[in-house]
């Protein structure tokens, strides 16, 4: 209990609050700038966290993750351009509101919905992560292996249009995680004579290359194609007030969408896009007479943004409890924690209880900071949508390469980053999920360890799984889900 209180006290330290504010500011800027998204922003920011304390680093990254999601609503509302797929739902009613002169009202409801969903998701994380971690400590490697297989199957099915291509990407990520010295025998694996690979492929090179630098290549391709960029504006109207009456009007939507976003966030692979569409569909189904979704309905914006931001903290539940990243943001957070010698998983609550409590505290503080910063800079952040992509791409590219170099001060890491950027672009072109690849790479070491332990326990007899009811149930569910998604993709 004392470590828990000390951890929450650490979250209120001036230095940590300063990093939260910095993260939120950067998150809003990155979320609003055209061409950037949450995973790319986090990938670029991870190297900066190397010089911080573990709690400050996590506070900084969480601020970016949460605020970039809220900032992404700005481009969706003002210029009908979603920075991420989940923001496409916000466009449905946000842009019609902007065209009707209610842009400021739409931005306000997006901000308040983001904070509301974030707080609900964070409270769910605080309440559920520890009990789930205690349960995870009591299960064996066979159960853990099947849980990771199920998570990878679910992510592969939902992160792309093809389950088989998703599984192939995930399997390639797991294979890449085996590069380096074998922990048992000390034998080099897949190093091809490169001394720099004896410690394995650097996680930052993979994340920065796959998520940030490859995204810049994709954005540059769009610029070369001379896509026409709309100009943001804030047309004025007398109906831009969002007071107590308006809040009570959308409160049921806030509440329902928060629950939907939290539940979807707990399941690995579903992510904010699924949550936004599900919450929007639920709000539309419960629409009252006179509420016209798709034509500038305020509840449409509320549903999409609330569910989207509830997913972020909820996706950390499997991360802290099981060591499984429920989203790309959670996978990148693993990189930051690993840099500081902290391995996410159920033992975090035993070995780093004060740090975990501090992280929970910083997440609640981040929500409040996001509300204040977002409200003050509501109109100012909107002007960033005017920054052309031709200015953003070169700057971000330099930051990516600099970040890759800072971790190990090695040009080999920079070369790897460029290689993974090219690989990420090729995977994007041929519809192989970069998300599934990254998560497969992140869970690869833990998956290999659990699989080896399972083989030792079972003596290589796969039928032993039938003697473990939980593992058998998970296998059946995974196979059923795989068959369902394969049939759905063919339909």
Image: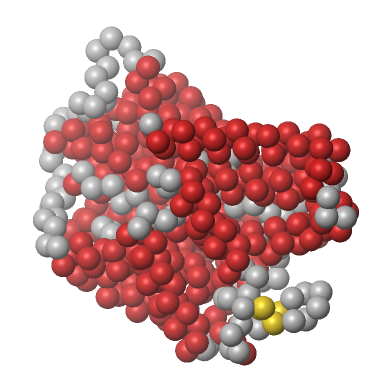
Query: How far across and how far down the image is residue 163, in percent?
Result: 48, 45
258 lies above or below 81 = above
Name of the residue lying farthest toward the top = 289
Residue at screen point 75% across, 57% down = 451
Is 247 situated left or right of 358 in this image?
A: left
- Viewer-proximal residue, 380 or 336? 336
Query: How far across and how far down the image is residue 327, in percent?
Result: 53, 50
- Which quarter of the figure is the C terminus placed in? top left
459 lies above or below 251 = below
- Viewer-proximal residue, 107 or 190? 190
Query: How far across and how far down the image is residue 391, in percent?
Result: 22, 71
Can residue 361 be seen? no
Can residue 466 be seen? yes
Colour setting: secondary structure
Is 377 situated left or right of 406 in this image?
A: left
Q: Quadrant of residue 454?
A: bottom right
472 lies above or below 396 = above
User: How many numbered marks, from 0 up?
Assistant: 0
Q: Quadrant of residue 89?
A: top left
Query: How far across and how far down the image is residue 227, in percent?
Result: 13, 58
- Viewer-proximal residue, 193 or 284? 193
309 lies above or below 202 = above
Q: Quadrant of residue 307?
A: top left
Residue at screen point 36% across, 65% down = 426
Residue at screen point 35% across, 65% down = 425
């Amino acid at each position: 209990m004392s470590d828990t209180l000390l951890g929450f006290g650490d979250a209120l330290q001036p230095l940590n609050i300063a990093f939260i504010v910095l993260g939120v500011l950067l998150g809003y800027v990155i979320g609003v700038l055209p061409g950037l998204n949450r995973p790319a922003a986090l990938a670029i920011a991870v190297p900066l966290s190397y010089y911080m304390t573990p709690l400050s680093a996590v506070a900084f990254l969480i601020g970016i993750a949460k605020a970039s999601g809220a900032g992404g609503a700005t481009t969706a509302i003002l210029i009908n351009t979603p920075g991420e797929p989940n923001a496409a739902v916000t466009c449905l009613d946000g842009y019609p509101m902007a065209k009707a002169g209610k842009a400021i009202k739409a931005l306000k409801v997006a901000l308040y919905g983001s904070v509301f969903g974030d707080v609900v998701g964070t409270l769910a994380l605080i309440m559920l992560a520890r009990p789930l971690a205690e349960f995870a400590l009591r299960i064996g490697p066979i159960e853990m292996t099947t849980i990771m297989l199920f998570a990878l199957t679910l992510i592969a099915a939902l992160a792309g249009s093809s389950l088989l291509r998703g599984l192939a990407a995930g399997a390639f990520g797991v294979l890449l995680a085996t590069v380096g010295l074998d922990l048992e025998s000390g034998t080099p694996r897949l190093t091809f004579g490169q001394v720099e690979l004896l410690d394995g492929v650097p996680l930052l090179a993979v994340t920065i290359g796959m998520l940030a630098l490859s995204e810049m290549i994709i954005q540059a391709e769009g610029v070369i194609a001379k896509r026409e960029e709309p100009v943001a504006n804030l047309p004025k109207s007398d109906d831009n007030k969002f007071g107590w009456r308006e809040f009570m009007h959308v409160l049921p939507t806030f509440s329902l969408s928060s629950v939907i976003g939290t539940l979807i966030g707990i399941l690995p692979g579903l992510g904010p896009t699924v949550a936004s569409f599900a919450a929007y569909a639920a709000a539309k189904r419960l629409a009252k007479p006179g509420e016209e979704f798709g034509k500038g309905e305020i509840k449409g914006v509320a549903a999409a943004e609330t569910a989207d931001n509830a997913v972020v903290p909820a996706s950390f539940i499997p991360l802290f409890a099981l060591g499984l990243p429920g989203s790309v943001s959670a996978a990148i957070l693993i990189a930051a924690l690993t840099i500081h010698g902290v391995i996410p998983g159920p033992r975090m609550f035993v070995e780093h209880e004060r740090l975990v409590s501090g992280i929970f505290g910083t997440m609640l503080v981040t929500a409040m900071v996001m509300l204040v910063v977002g409200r003050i800079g509501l109109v100012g952040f909107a002007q960033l949508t005017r920054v052309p992509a031709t200015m953003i791409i070169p700057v971000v590219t330099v930051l990516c390469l600099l970040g890759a170099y800072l971790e190990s001060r090695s040009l080999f890491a920079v070369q790897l980053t460029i290689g993974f950027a090219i690989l990420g672009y090729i995977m994007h072109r041929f519809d192989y999920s970069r998300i599934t690849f990254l998560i497969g790479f992140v869970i690869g070491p833990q998956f290999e360890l659990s699989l080896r332990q399972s083989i030792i326990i079972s003596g290589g007899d796969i039928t032993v799984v039938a003697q473990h009811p939980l593992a058998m149930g998970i296998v059946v569910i995974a196979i059923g889900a795989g068959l369902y998604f394969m049939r759905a993709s063919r339909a």
